[in-house]
Amino acid sequence: MAKSSNDEHKRYQERTSSFREAIDDILKREKETLSLLQQNSEDAPVKLVGLAEDMLNLSSNYIILSDVSQVILGTRDEDPLNDARKSLLRAVTYMEKVVSNYIDVPFSDYEDKLVGIADMGAAERYRLVRKIGLTIRLLEDAFGENSKWKWTFVELRGRFATVAKNILDLKKAVANTDPRSPDYEPTMYHLRLVKKLLSQSADQYREKYEISTKNIDDLKLAIVFLSALRRLALVLGNRDEEELIKKKQSSWVTRFEADLKKK
């Protein structure tokens, strides 16, 4: 049995060597980039986007380590999954530094943040947002349904929804809803995704409040995400959609005020 275990461990090391090398390379590059940012922040937004991409790739490599462990060793190694979770958090944090973490404010409040990534096209922004979402989903699946991190993922998804919204140049996005625009397709897909993410974050924070924490701040955040969704509908001129969100928000505010009085 011992010989078999040693053989399996050797196979695991051989199968994962290239992924561990990739992890080391990414971590080294992150350290070097952060050092450069301390010296010169002129192109900081572009470098931070690059760091976010690196952290997503880092997370993917960690997830693979855990998957290979499951296949070869027969056990799920959660250490690389925790490293993947931390890497994902860094990816979102880097993007928050680029586009802000404002959930529900007018576009004018963070418009100037997007100047640093003005050369990043609509399709590229949508691709990055999809990549973040895919990595989050892969990690959630790797941890499993009954993970102790279930409610932590609600917070991560909320931050992701905010980044996905804030990376959009809303002035261009409104113009790009014209089917004649060359950026029509990626913009429409991006907008649909942002609406879905904001709605999900609102519902998940409400669920977190009801089922887990009973913390009134979670219900408050759920309402803020609904408000952001409503603001987006107004910007896009979707009056019927805005009215539906308004009704839902109103009922949640009523619940919030009632629960706040009880507390």
Image: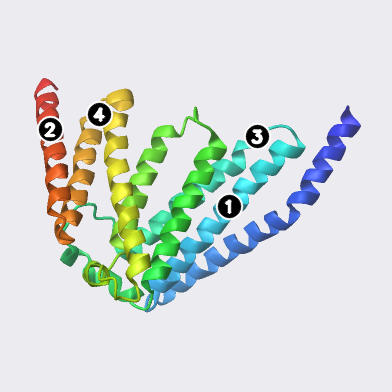
Task: Compare marks 4 and 1 and give the one earlier in the sequence.
Answer: 1
Task: Compare marks 2 and 3 and give the one earlier in the sequence.
Answer: 3
Which residue is the site of mark 4?
215
Q: Residue at x 65, y 34 (%)?
A: 76
Nearer to the camera, 82 or 183:
183
- Residue furthest right in the image: 3
**Is residue 181 found left or right of 134 in the rendered image?**
left
Q: Position of residue 51 (x, y in %)?
A: 48, 64
Cα–Cα gap, marks 4 and 1? 33 Å
Q: Residue at x 9, y 24 (%)?
A: 261
Q: Look at the image and tell me in which quarter the C terminus lies.
A: top left
Disc 4: CA contacts within 10 A as few (<14), some (14-19) or many (>=20)? few
Disc 2 versus disc 3: nearer the observer: 2
Q: Position of residue 254 (x, y in %)?
A: 9, 30
- Residue furthest front in the image: 179
Cα–Cα gap, marks 3 and 1? 15 Å
Disc 4 versus disc 1: nearer the observer: 1
* Amino acid type assigned to the residue bearing label 2 in the image: Ser
Which residue is the site of mark 3?
76
* Amino acid type assigned to the residue bearing label 4 in the image: Asn
Element type at marker 1?
helix
Which residue is the site of mark 2?
251
* Amino acid type assigned to the residue bearing label 3 in the image: Arg
Which residue is the site of mark 1?
60
Element type at marker 2?
helix
CB atoms of marks 4 and 1 within 8 Å: no
